[in-house]
């Protein structure tokens, strides 16, 4: 939790309270439904919460912006971002029902009212949003093909054009090559000093 406060010192008391509550909630739910690997749950704040908030170092979403978190898993990056941006709407989607259950229970427990949830495959979600965010495991071009239909044309005047924002690691130059004229890469090591972030990046692709 100290890491969150160090990098985001302007949190309100309500936001601090919600971020603090995540530790016990995720430990409790993870014991019942494994959404974070057992060996990684003790790194919840650095590897999951702070990693999710890396997106907030790239863009501060304007009030009224609508965002889909695709393949949210246990609620990352959607739930940390929803805490940080209470006037932004988040729609968390995952194809595994028990993961959506954990997200729903965590959000209810901390009183998050700017999130909705859906258990479905990405291809089934037809709503449109300003941005799709994802902690992406699939190749970038595959992800773009799936989410292109979900990005609305009219923008909310955010600092970045409507599109896909994903958290990925490793060597990404080749992956972004087909969309290099529309893609921007940001290294999280420029914002966070922890070793974990050395190879972690945020990619924005305007769609």
Image (cartoon, grey):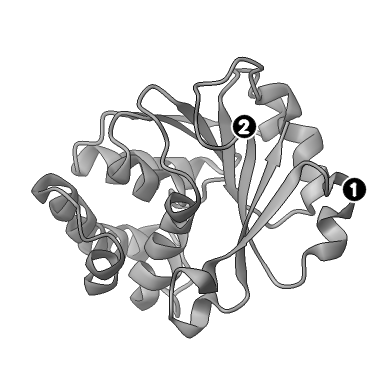
- How many numbered marks appear? 2
Is residue 37 in view from this perspective? yes
Residue pushed farthest top?
A: 154
Foreground residue among 184 and 174: 184
Quarter residue 78 falls in: top left
Mark 1: few/some/many CA within 10 Å (<14, 14-19, 20+): few
Q: Looking at the figure, which quarter contains the N terminus?
A: bottom left
Mark 2: few/some/many CA within 10 Å (<14, 14-19, 20+): some
From the top left corner, tell me how far across and down residue 105 is, in percent. 30, 42
Mark 2 vs mark 1: which is more N-terminal?
2
From the top left corner, tell me how far across and down residue 113 is, in percent. 26, 29
Task: Left or right? Give the position of 5 relative to 202.
Answer: left
Cα gap from disc 2 to disc 1, whole angstroms: 18 Å
From the top left corner, tell me how far across and down residue 52 is, in percent. 45, 56
Residue 161: mark in rendering: 2
Residue 192: mark in rendering: none
- Residue beneath the point at 84% across and 45% down: 179
Residue pushed farthest left?
A: 13
- Residue beneath the point at 60% across and 31% down: 120
Helix, strand or loop at mark 2: loop
- Residue beneath the point at 25% across and 57% down: 22
Frontmost of labels 2 and 1 is 2
Task: Left or right? Give the position of 195 relative to 203.
Answer: left
- Residue beneath the point at 44% across and 81% down: 194
Residue on which disc 1 sits: 178
């Amino acid at each position: 939790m100290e890491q969150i406060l160090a990098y985001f010192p302007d949190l309100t008391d309500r936001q601090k309270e919600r971020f603090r509550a995540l530790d016990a909630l995720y430990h409790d739910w993870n014991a019942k439904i494994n959404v974070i690997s057992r060996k990684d749950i003790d790194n919840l704040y650095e590897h999951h919460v702070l990693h999710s908030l890396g997106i907030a170092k790239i863009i501060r979403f304007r009030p009224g912006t609508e965002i889909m978190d695709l393949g949210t898993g246990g609620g990352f990056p959607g739930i940390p971002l929803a805490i940080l941006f209470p006037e932004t709407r988040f729609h968390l989607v995952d194809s595994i029902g028990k993961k959506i259950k954990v997200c729903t229970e965590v959000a209810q427990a901390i009183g998050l009212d700017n999130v909705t949830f859906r258990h479905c495959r990405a291809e089934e979600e037809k709503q449109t949003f300003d941005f799709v965010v994802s902690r992406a495991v699939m190749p970038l071009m595959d992800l773009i093909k799936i989410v292109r239909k979900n990005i609305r044309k009219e923008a909310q005047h955010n600092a970045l054009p409507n599109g896909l924002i994903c958290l990925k690691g490793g060597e990404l130059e080749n992956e972004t090559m087909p969309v290099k004229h529309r893609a921007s890469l940001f290294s999280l090591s420029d914002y966070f000093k922890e070793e974990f972030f050395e190879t972690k990046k945020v990619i924005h692709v305007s769609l």
